[in-house]
Image (cartoon, helix red, strand yellow):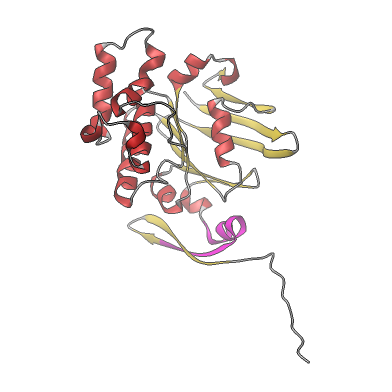
């Protein structure tokens, strides 16, 4: 079941945020969305999730326009992990993850639901905190719990908005490895906003680079993460290296093209 975005445009009353967005994602593929702050990355994820209503274009899951799907149908097909980890109510880690099963039952979870939650907790290395209060966890722990909740939905598409931003380097790699394994094993399509270009290069099948609400480049890491693209989109001079067949981006210095030269005349 293929995710297809056609000519997407999203605007606020006085500002266009996204326009001319065209991309597709197949089963078992990971697409990382990169770009500077304010380029429209999170807005694009929210349009796919249905949290924002775009003005033009379409988003199809298979042959179905997602605007025709009910909230319950969307929840069965899409798992969403937002940037914010705060919950307004007290809940254990176990119960928070169990919420991911809510689209599948009306009154009480089945043994199958509970077994699936336990399996996800084990995969995400959350056994030691399974019955702790979610709101008392560190930001990194909360992020891992929210990813686990999304995985408990057994989605066809996993949307992640900066899933590794609050994680240490060990758990960044752990989470990315889990996402990569689940994507290929369970044929999940992963659409992920991420700031770390090196993680994107390592794990993405496709990289979508945004600039000012439009697609600047899309393709493999080698095609997208070039010195020229990084300079034009981020305003940063960089070096690109290849180690063990994996591309790495080394930022060198910021290029401020808007800065004017001032000459001082001393009397």
Picture coordinates of residue 48 (x, y %)?
Answer: 55, 29
Picture coordinates of residue 218 (x, y %)?
Answer: 55, 45
Residue 150's place in the image compared with 83, above or below, is: above
Single out the residue that lies furthest toward the bottom: 267
State how many labels appear: 0
Give the residue drawn at x 61%, y 46%: 39
Residue 60's place in the image compared with 104, above or below, is: below
Question: Does residue 72 show up magenta in the picture?
Answer: no
**Image side of residue 211 versus residue 187, left or right:** right
Picture coordinates of residue 154 (x, y %)?
Answer: 36, 23
Say which quarter of the image contains residue 22. top right
Picture coordinates of residue 193 (x, y %)?
Answer: 49, 41
Residue 60's place in the image compared with 263, above or below, is: above
Residue 179 showing in the rendered view:
no
Magenta segment, which residues?
Answer: 226-241
For the C terminus, the image quarter is bottom right
Single out the residue that lies furthest toward the left: 128
44, 105: nearer the viewer: 105
201, 69: nearer the viewer: 69
Give the residue drawn at x 36%, y 7%: 107
267, 159: nearer the viewer: 267
Give the residue drawn at x 65%, y 43%: 214
**Image side of residue 116 versus residue 9, left or right:** left
Give the residue drawn at x 37%, y 54%: 246
Residue 82 showing in the rendered view:
yes
125, 34: nearer the viewer: 125
């Amino acid at each position: 079941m293929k995710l297809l975005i056609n000519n997407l445009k999203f605007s606020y009353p006085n500002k266009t945020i996204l326009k001319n967005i065209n991309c597709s994602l197949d089963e078992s593929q990971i697409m990382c969305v990169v770009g500077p702050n304010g380029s429209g990355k999170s807005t694009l994820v929210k349009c796919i999730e249905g949290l924002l209503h775009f003005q033009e274009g379409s988003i199809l899951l298979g042959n179905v326009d997602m605007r025709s799907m009910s909230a319950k149908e969307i929840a069965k097909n899409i798992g969403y992990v937002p940037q914010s980890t705060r919950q307004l109510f007290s809940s254990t880690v176990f119960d928070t993850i169990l919420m991911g099963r809510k689209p599948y039952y009306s009154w009480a979870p089945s043994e199958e639901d509970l077994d699936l939650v336990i399996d996800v907790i084990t995969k995400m290395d959350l056994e030691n905190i399974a019955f702790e209060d979610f709101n008392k966890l560190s930001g990194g722990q909360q992020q891992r719990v929210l990813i686990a909740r999304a995985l408990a939905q057994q989605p066809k598409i996993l949307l992640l908005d900066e899933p590794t931003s609050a994680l240490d380097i060990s758990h960044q790699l752990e989470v990315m490895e889990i996402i990569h394994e689940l994507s290929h094993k369970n044929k999940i399509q992963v659409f992920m906003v991420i700031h770390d270009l090196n993680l994107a290069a390592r794990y993405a099948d496709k990289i979508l680079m945004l600039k000012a609400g439009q697609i600047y480049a899309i393709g493999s890491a080698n095609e997208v993460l070039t010195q020229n693209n990084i300079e034009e989109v981020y305003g940063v001079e960089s070096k690109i290296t290849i180690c063990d067949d994996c591309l790495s981006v080394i930022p060198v210095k910021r290029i401020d093209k808007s800065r004017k030269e001032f000459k001082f005349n001393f009397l």
